[in-house]
Amino acid sequence: MIGGEPVAVFGELHPEVITNFGLDHPAAAVEIDVTALVRIIWSE
């Protein structure tokens, strides 16, 4: 969170998802809300 506004979500993928994609090692994913980041930057 930046300035009380969430801008990203991240975490490790469920083991079943990793297996379904044929991966051998744990994996993580991230989603960044660029619109929220721009809104925060421009409001300063």
Image (cartoon, rainbow, N blue to C red):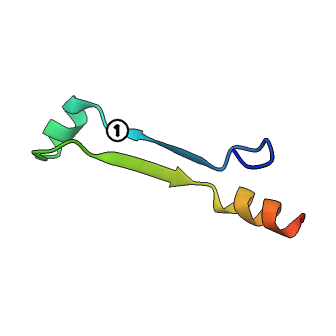
* Label tally: 1
Indicate the quadrant where residue 32 lies.
Answer: bottom right
Tell me if 21 is positioned left or right of 41 in this view.
left
Indicate the quadrant where residue 25 lies.
Answer: top left
For badge 1, the amino acid type reads Glu
Badge 1: how crowded within 10 Å, few (<14), some, or many (20+)? Answer: few
Q: Residue at x 21, y 41 (%)?
A: 26
The answer to whether residue 37 is above or below residue 42 is above
| The N terminus: image quadrant | top right
Tell me if 11 is positioned left or right of 20 in this view.
right
Where residue 41 sits: x, y (%)? 80, 66
Q: Residue at x 24, y 36 (%)?
A: 17
Tell me if 24 is positioned left or right of 7 in this view.
left
Q: Residue furthest right?
A: 43
Q: Please name the residue that numbered disc 1 is placed on.
A: 12
Where residue 44 sits: x, y (%)? 89, 65
Where residue 6 sits: x, y (%)? 69, 44
Tell me if 9 is positioned left or right of 41 in this view.
left
Q: Secondary structure at mark 1?
A: strand
The answer to whether residue 17 is above or below residue 3 is above
The answer to whether residue 2 is above or below residue 43 is above
Q: Residue at x 31, y 37 (%)?
A: 13
